[in-house]
Amino acid sequence: MNEKQEQNKKTEKVLLARYGVIVTLLMLFAVMIIFTAGRLAFSSEGRKWREVGEKETVIRDRVILPERGSIYTYDGRLLATTEPLYSIYMDFWADGMEKDTLYKYVGELSHALATKFPDRTAAQYKRVILNGWKMREEEQRQIRENRERGIDKRVPIRSRYVKILRHDISYVDLKEIRTFPFWNQRSNRSGLIAEERNARKKPFGNLATRTVGSVFKDLDKGGASGLELKYDSLLRGVPGVKFRQKIQGKWMDVVEKPAVAGWDLVTTLDAEIQDITERALREKLLETEAESGTAIIMEVKTGEIKGIANLDRMSNGDYAEGNPNAFSYMNEPGSTFKTVTVMVALDDGVVTPTDSFHVGNGLFQYNRRWVRDHYWRRGQDRGYFTVAEGLAISSNVVMSKIALKGYENNPKKFVEGIDRIGLRKQLQWDVPLKGIEGTSSIRFPDDKNNYWSKTTLPWMSFGYEVQVPPIYLLMFYNAIANNGRMIKPFIAKQLVKDGKVLKEMKAEVVNPMICKETTLQQIHEMLVGVIEEGTARVVASDYFPMAGKTGTAQIASGGGYGGYYVSFCGYFPADEPLYTIFVGIRKPRGVPSGGGMAGMVFKKIAEQTYIRKVQLTVEDCPVDSLLSKEPPLKNGNWTHCRKMLTLLGLPAGETEEPSEWVKVVEDRNAYIPQPLSLNGSLVPDVHGMGARDALYLLEEAGLRVQLNGAGRVVSQSISPGSRLVKGRTIAITLK
């Protein structure tokens, strides 16, 4: 028994010795690991390897662009908003990507991409993808050779992000391409990378686009014009920071600092009134082939601009939003300024409305320079006109004689009267401007930089030798409608964050009372007379009274004059004013007429706004009013058109030959359908159609449709009758 115990003790000692050796070796190994780790942690070699490892697994300091704030109409309709777009890349170093699988499906993937995005052929897509894989193989070869030679040189990895699609795509398209062959796998196998970025979208197309403004293509640069630029610091938000880290073979975004979305901007604009304003102005510009035009409508009591159109003629003859004409028209205003002259003279007691002046045959010479009325060539002696009659028929002679009677010996007093109204005040507007744009330029007798000539006073009296932009004239006439209270027109109404109003903007009071109450009443009656008995009789509405003044002025150019600028400014209804409108048309073709051109735009905007905002019924509209004309019918499906005509009780003609799709022509008796020729191999003509019919025809033909605006189609990016290529994108514009 003792011998057995001794044997056990010997065995135990041997085991403990062996265990001690093992423990000692493990401890030495642990010490070596700790020593090596410490050396790597604090040595330059360690820093080098950490940098290499981080470059392979972490991409730092990537900016997260904040969501740019949206811009709305007064009632919450989107004018501009931010939507995500995606840039599509492939990572050919994805851990699970296999060459055999890629080569097996690259043909099918390329064909699917070419069908969806036809700006490249299937062969071109295939070449881009295979070149990406070949780039990876070349990078692998270089890495292997460097390692074998012991060269410590980093090989640039360009095949990790190879751009596959030329253009960014929407989220809907992104979901679709993730179903394509090879790309329908997990991203660590397919290598598909979708880089998100924010883009600006305007749901109403070009509606008020110059006022809303634009942003730079690179959205992080912010606003480029209009409200987008003026309120850029609030709309853009605060960028965040993220890094991409490779976790279990898959790249993931890790947010260090989240982005803060920008504030939303609510405007005063009314989408319906804006559309009315743009349509009325465009129709007249097309009719007169004018160079450009502007129209503004604002609420009398609040100063809120409800519609503003700035249209310039394009190279194709159509009109689009261009310069901020409402602010940048630095023209001599002409006869719309005569109301200012009469107001100053009445307020100073120089004249009364019934004082009369001899006009004769419409010619008056002062300091060897002739003042002419528009009828002077007829040679007819008109005798005497009162002040009220002179304003009604827009007599230059009467205005110049009023100014000379009261201010010939003291012209400074006349300009002080203009100052008293508030027309020389410098104001800041919601639209960013340059130089003197948006500021009245009215001469002062003591101004050494702007020479006051011996004829400045009489010529200033009828709107020459001064520059007053449309926005100032709108503000002035609105003050008359607003019982003498002059307020600054404005567009930006509220700043909103997360549905909460952070700042509310109201109209700035420029002048609480522009003139005496008696003067104001006299001016109001004269402006009503301009429409009822004067140069703007054609503007008169059969439904409600209006007040305003026409304007026709030659445009100064190169030391002389070239072309005309016609305008109209007024308010309605005259008895209880709701809205004030300014319309200006630059260089129209034909004989210029402030009433017949600008005034008719005023009338159309006024009547159509009134019918929508004051709830006129069809029965209330006079027969010869613009409101009761037979409605134009859109081209399209004749079955639907005929059904609509039947419901409205309007006469419908018949096609000479049976046709489902027609162009509708109006004659005195009925709406006549003319068959549209449709060929399955050619792009259909959708001009004049509504959105529904145009979309149906184009998509039925195999085209992808990008729709802009509302109304009826006025242009299509692929000409009718062109060879049809299925899958192409066609842009159509509706107005």
Image (spheres, helix red, strand yellow):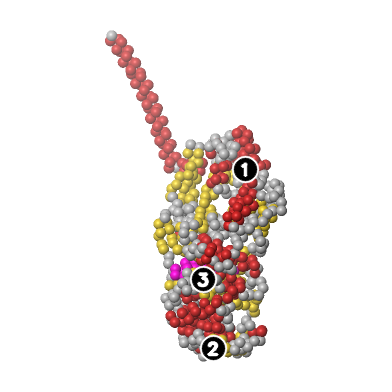
Q: Of the residues tagged 1 and 3, which is closer to the observer?
A: 3
- Residue found at x 46% / y 79%: 521
- Can the viewer see residue 721 in this picture? no
Dot 3 amino acid type:
Phe
- The numbered mark, 1 or 3, whose residue comes first in the sequence reads 1
Residue 544 - label: 3
For marks 1 and 2, give the CA distance.
81 Å
In this view, the mark in front (1 or 2): 2
Task: Report the quarter where the C terminus lies.
Answer: bottom right
Q: Is residue 259 above or below residue 193?
A: below
Q: Which of marks 3 and 2 is in front?
A: 3
Closer to the chain start, of discs 3 and 2, is: 2
Q: Position of residue 701 (x, y in %)?
A: 66, 47
* Distance (Cα) linking label 3 and label 2: 30 Å
**Residue 447 sits inside the magenta stretch:** no
Q: Residue 113 carries which label?
A: 1
Mark 1 or 2, nearer chain start = 1
State the residue position of label 2.
356
Q: Residue at x 42, y 55 (%)?
A: 499
Q: Please tell me whether residue 183 is drawn above or below residue 728 in the rendered image.
A: above
Task: Give the secondary structure at mark 3.
Answer: loop
Residue ID at (65%, 58%): 671
Give amino acid for label 2.
Ser
Quadrant location of the N terminus in the rendered image: top left
Where residue 349 appears, as percent x and y from the top left, is: 46, 87
Count of marks overlaid on the render: 3
Q: Is residue 100 left or right of residue 248?
A: right
Q: Which segment is the magenta one?
A: 293-305
Q: Does the magenta stretch include residue 303?
A: yes
Q: Is mark 2 on a helix, strand or loop?
A: strand
